[in-house]
Amino acid sequence: MRTLALFAAAAALFAGPAFAAGYGEFTGNWRNNDPNTSDITRLRITFDGGGNLDVRAWGQCHPTDCDWGKVDAVAYSPSPSANPATSATEIIANFNPGFARKTMIITARPGAQLSYAVYTRFTDGSGRRPYVVRGLMRKHVGGWPGWPPGGGGVSGITLYQHVNYGGARLFINSDTPSLVPRGWNDIASSLRVSGSGAWEVCEHVNYGGRCRVVSSNVSSLVPGGWNDMISSVRRYTGGGGPGGGGLGFNEDCINFNWHNVQARHVGGEWKVVEGNHWMLSMGNKAGEANRAKNIIRHFRFSQHCFIG
């Protein structure tokens, strides 16, 4: 029964609709779910900085995997008006190992997985017939020889389209002076930092305008006026570049329910509260307290954070 259930789940995964993803769901290192596969063993998908994705593939060989090399990939979205950087569901890469033409279709799936189908057509005159293989890949965060530099887990920063890490995502592990080619200019509303070190996010391209150094996850960029404001990203080295000032931020956040936020006159002052949780004090300014309450409820803020 368990085997049947697993088979049914796998079949549903391959047959199900594509997962609206974007470049961030494809980039990274990937391992085949089947350690005994006879076809694709691993993939490395990267952003080339010019608006496209690159795919490097390895096939099963003995004693070591065969490197198919790196090729450009084309990303496909559900409609002509959609931006592939934030909505691509599939990418297609074509390989030429010399004896055949291989077309690889890679589809984003929920749960940090990719499904793939490789269509092989022989060109060596051997008489072998075209065939197709399919499989599943899972994101690989550990190192393999030569990747990532220095080994260990992947260090980088992930930008998210919505607060609380929702919507499309974009993973970055190198200095990016402009998010425009990736379709991510002024898009991010939350972010996560992985691995060691800190990152500097800036308001304008080429690290211009205001910059902020982050070394831990930020569930909402709304406080401080950073929502939909990031245009460039780079690894922070402590130099305090233009607008940076070398200042880092760590958050200590308290969750609350925006439905319950009220403006009340408590202890001789107007305050913004959620139950017994006092968030803001406005003195004798009832209008300011009500305005703050309305803003919190309108934008559905869910955390009260202390930054220092």
Image (cartoon, grey):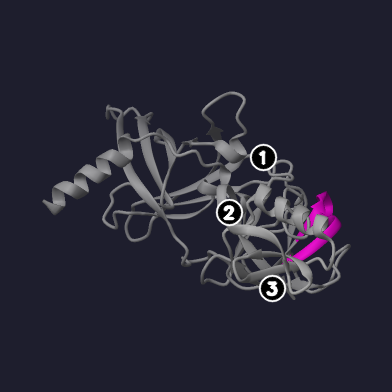
Q: What is the distance, in whole Å, between disc 3 and disc 2 at their CAs? A: 27 Å
SS of the residue under disc 3: loop
Three-letter amino acid code of the residue under disc 1: Gly
- Whichever of callouts 1 and 3 sits on the residue coming sooner in the sequence is 1
Q: Quadrant of residue 279?
A: bottom right
SS of the residue under disc 1: loop
Question: Which of label 3 and label 2 is nearer to you?
Answer: 2
Q: Quadrant of residue 181?
A: top right
**Residue 213 on the magenta segment:** yes
Q: Is residue 58 above or below residue 83?
A: below
Three-letter amino acid code of the residue under disc 3: Asn
The image's mark for residue 187 is none
Q: Residue at (64%, 56%) from the top-left corner?
A: 301
Question: Which of label 1 and label 2 is nearer to you?
Answer: 2
Category of crowding for the residue at label 1, using alpha-carbon neighbours closer than 10 angstroms: few (below 14), some (14–19), many (at least 20)? some
User: Which residue is tagged 3?
Assistant: 250
Q: Position of residue 56 (x, y in %)?
A: 50, 48
Q: Position of residue 149 (x, y in %)?
A: 58, 67
Q: Residue at (74%, 45%) from the top-left corner?
A: 186
Q: What is the distance, in whole Å, between disc 1 and disc 3 at their CAs? A: 32 Å
Q: Toward the viewer: 246 or 65? A: 246
Magenta region: 201-214
Q: Toward the viewer: 307 or 171? A: 307
Residue 302 shows in the view: yes
The image's mark for residue 259 is 2
116 with respect to 211 (left or right): left
User: Which residue is tagged 1?
Assistant: 51
